[in-house]
Image (tube, rainbow, N blue to C red):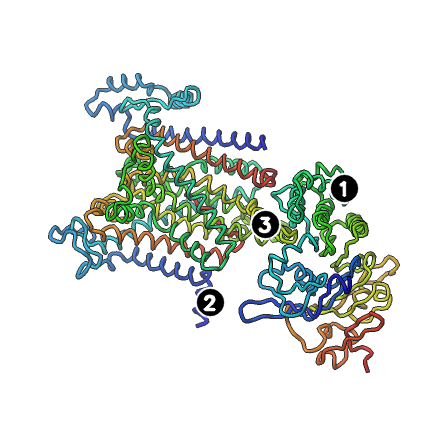
Amino acid sequence: MIRLHRLVNGFGGPAGFLGALIVIALLVMAVGAPWIAPRDPLLVDISNQLLEPGGQFPFGTDQSGRDVLSRVIWGTRASLSVSAIAVVIGMAGGVTLGLIAGFYRGGWIEQITVRFLEAISAIPILIWAIALVGIFGVGDMRVGPFVLANEAKLMILLGLLYIPTLARVTYTTALVQSQANFVLARRLQGTGGLRIMVSDVLPNCLSPVIVQATLLLAIGIIIEASVSFVGLGVQPPTPSWGNMLADARNYLMSGEWWISVFPGAAISLAVVGFNLLGDGLRDRLDPRHAAAVLAT
Amino acid sequence: MASLFLRRAGVSLLSLLLVSLVLFVLTRSIPDSPARIVLGDEATPADIAHFDADHGLDKPILVQYFRWVGGIVFHADLGKSFTTGLRMNDQVANTLPVTLELVMLAFVVSVVVSLALGTMSAVLRDTPLDYGARLIAVLGVSVPGFWLALVLILFFAVDRDWFPPGGVVPITDDVYEHLRSLVLPAFCLGIFYMAVLTRMTRSSLLDVLGQDFMRTARASGLSRPRVLMYALRNALVPVVTIAGMSFGHMFGWALIIEQVFNIDGLSHALLQAIQQRDYAMVQAVVMVFTVVFVVANLCADVVNASLNPRMAAAA
Amino acid sequence: MSGPLLQIDGLHIAFGSRSVWRDVVRGVDLRVSAGEVVGLVGESGSGKSLTALSVMGLLPLGAKVSSGRILFDGTELVGMRDGAMNKLRGRDIGMIFQDPLSALNPAIPVGKQIVDSLRTHASMTRRAAEARVVELLDLVGINQPAERARAYAHELSGGMRQRVMTALAVSSNPKLLIADEPTTALDVTVQAQVIGMLDRIRRDLGIAVLFISHNLDLVASICDRVSVMYAGRVVESGAVEPLFDAPRHPYTRQLLRCVPRLDGGTGPMPTIPGLPPRFGSVLPGCAFTPRCVVSQARCSAQAPPMRRESGHLSVCWEGVP
């Protein structure tokens, strides 16, 4: 009982714990999609077109007779992977830049990094993501020996566009931490700058970064869905929540509600999950920084 | 104050130049050249060279860039489309007003509602009203606008005839119908930022209400409304910053909303340009949006400097 | 007028939430007569600031007056509705806080803050209020008051901020001024100036002052009477001179020994060994027992008696047969 209580508080309270449960469930679905999904999400079955939810199709079927439940489960994979990898890219770039700028404060390194970040934050993310995916075309793109699928392009773009937000969070914390007494003490011991930065300052900057990253995951899911919805994200027939909704649009007026409701609900559930988790973690890890800056 | 504005404006201008260069280089580095797209696969190298010379595409990329920027800065001319030959200025003039109106409407409503809701939520902390406002805020950031749009169209436009399911009635036809046709799109566009700003207002105000100077205001016997004004002067600073960014970001989300509601706005034009591989148009539209975004952020800085002079001194 | 201006009887203040409340101020009695300066002395955490805030009706969230009476000018303040209380605040009772930088609104010019207070309590035109602000700033010893009125708190020096704070607190000619550690956040050289200014103002305007401090020298220099608090209780009170010359309570004695003196000779600074009791913890007897140099067996078991001799009160077993 007490252990459960401590577990719940570890996520900043019941709401954060609920968020963690949702996120874990989503992760399980994303990873285990081939085993969890009852049917092949791509299997077209003209005899079972537009069936209402019930019986062997709990979420019904779409215009091609594909199982909506299986497609929603496989869609988790597309949504989470785009969102998660984008955040990883954003963290790699943002934390590095923010840390360097905050640690080497007062020098030209800080000046250049801060100006550079200021310049990129003059970019409205969504428009650029859409325009750039549009410019490069929605098909596979060849970069040297690599072939980038459209999802990969989206991940990289979103990741790049997340950099300023994450860098700013890291920078403000690193600025304070670098002047803390324990860092001074390390310097007096003669420890090298780079080493202090990585092993002393960095760990102390991670709390606000983790909180921000969780919230960016939620935003990433919405952006992926939106971009796929207008046909520039995950390409059919690969199911994603966004492109399922794009299909569903044509059947909205004729009353086949289940094609749009289930993927839409999945998006909302995922976003609620990440938001609750992020808020909970903030209460737990970073209570002073009450207001997070949203990136989109 | 004036010098602060000038410095911020200078930085913004530099950012714009840098960002526009990146955009320009990216649009020029795509595998298909405009000549290929327009003339097709059968075109001879001579045809292509001719096309490039006509459109100035044979010049070095930096020269092309400075011509383009020069056109924008000195002649307010966004250039011509290589593929359709249409003047971009006309295109933008035709489509920007609807988008601008939509975004303005969504922005004003969401700012007004979120300030009221967030303030109420903070002042009446831990009452049912506060819980209600917080619930709305969580739902607002969690429901994607385009999905909400689909559901609302189904509910209010298809099942009931309260609002039109799409399109915008021109204001010159009928003012009432015009506004009616904007209600659903503006709502779907604004709800996300309404939720974000409500949360920000609430947490920022709670933070300020706990400060020493608020105790002084109470100790001076000031009336409740005035005490609240004292708090808001300080609490609104982060809210204004985010509101400024929201305004710019709304143009991005407008793209999705315009798509769902079949509105011929600038965002919709961007999508069309992408589909037609009209990169000059993509470039122009993105540039217009970026300028709007930068200007909105600049306005937020100015509002903040007048709200809180210490900000201005520190910046 | 009969009776003191401010009369606090058996004040208990508790911290807590829902069902669990713990008293941190336990039975404080205090009197301030019109025009009088009363000092309230004690270590941080002794409950002196809470006592002051309870008079203003501005206890922090999670704290409440659990029992006792606070009479101001014959009116009961405990349980008074906030609307009525708000009419007293600023008009009849002014308050000065410890850190003037955080106590002044950073986003509003200091003059405007005084103008707003003035116009809340009296119907005045903006222009008249602005003129009055310049007078007030001049009164508290600020040079170029008209320009300073337009400044923001962060543009002023520490001493000047506390002068502004004082001008704000006395702007509507209150009967009582509560000064909560008004000089603690200031440089030593500025402290004396601000105290001198405070003393002059309260004489000029005939304001009674409740002066809260842990600085005994300051209290001795400007107060008429003084109450010493320890762990939520008043342990000794009386007129300044007899109390400082012949302190009766061992805590006061030990406290006075800790004040550095120029003629004190060499050797280590005396201190009081140990720490004050934990916030809200309850002992049946005297809370000072563990640190007291003259404690007896009954001290920790039984509450000490109150003994009063010619207005000098002490709460201690010492010398009781």
Q: Amino acid at mark 1?
A: Asp
User: Are the residues at dot 3 and dot 1 in contact (C-beta closer than 8 Å)?
Assistant: no
| Residue at left offset 66%, top offset 55% | C89
Query: Which residue position holds label 3?
Result: B227
What element does badge 3 sit on?
Answer: helix
Front residue of A24/C125: it is C125
Mark 2 surroundings within 10 Å by alpha-carbon count, few (fewer than 14), some (14 through 19), many (20 or more): few
**Letter of the chain that mark 1 sits on in the rendering:** C
Front residue of C266/A126: it is A126
C-alpha separation, residue under disc 2 versus residue under disc 1:
59 Å
Give residue C216's quadrant in the image. Answer: bottom right
Q: Nearer the viewer, mark 3 or mark 2?
A: 3
Quadrant where the C terminus of chain A is found in the figure? top left
Query: Which residue position holds label 1?
Result: C138
Q: Amino acid at mark 2?
A: Arg
**Letter of the chain that mark 2 sits on in the rendering:** A
Q: Residue A6 shows which numbered tag?
A: 2
**Letter of the chain that mark 3 sits on in the rendering:** B
Q: Amino acid at mark 3?
A: Val
Q: Position of residue C65 (x, y in %)?
A: 63, 66
**Side of B178 where B1 appears, left or right:** right
Front residue of B296/B187: it is B187
Give residue A134's quadrant in the image. Answer: top left
